[in-house]
Image (cartoon, helix red, strand yellow):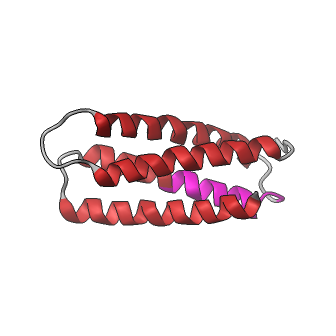
Amino acid sequence: MRSLVTVASLLAALAAVLSLGITLTTHPPYLGLRLAASVILLDQATLALLSIRLAALMRGLRPALLAASSLALVAGIGVLVACALPHSGSPETLMAVVGGFLVAHGLLTLLWLRSTPGTA
């Protein structure tokens, strides 16, 4: 399960960085939503990688990862709902992808935390 979370975290971090780059170069109408979702995804992925790689050194990281995973799950659902609502302009395809990554990575990390023994 650790390797799956590691790969998912690397993919999520890459998606967040690409989303930030695309957002900053295209100047979309919902700039704040895109930036917040991308930063939350990058934070979630980075925190999961740190928790996996530095678990022996940072025992207090588990509660932070639990909170970040829950936040990512809620934020991902919020982004997906915001993308589904009718709005002017082109469809928010990029944000739907980021929202999907937030939900998937948040759930995967919560499942991983549930399967590993508590250290905090």
Q: Does residue 14 appear anywhere in the picture?
A: yes
Residue shown at 31%/43% (left/top)?
33
Q: Does residue 40 appear anywhere in the picture?
A: no
Task: Tell which of 110 and 63 is nearer to you.
Answer: 110
* Figure check: 21 above or below 99: below
* Figure check: 48 above or below 63: below
Where in the figure is residue 56, as x and y percent of width and height?
Answer: 84, 59
The secondary structure making up most of the magenta span is helix
Residue 115 location, quadrant: top right
Q: Is residue 97 left or right of residue 120?
A: left
Residue shown at 34%/49% (left/top)?
95
- Name the residue furthest left: 88
Residue shown at 26%/32% (left/top)?
85
Quadrant occupied by the N terminus: bottom right
48 in the magenta segment = yes
Residue 16 location, quadrant: bottom left
Quadrant occupied by the C terminus: top right
Q: Is residue 15 left or right of residue 65?
A: left
> In the rendered structure, which segment of residues is drawn in magenta?
42-56
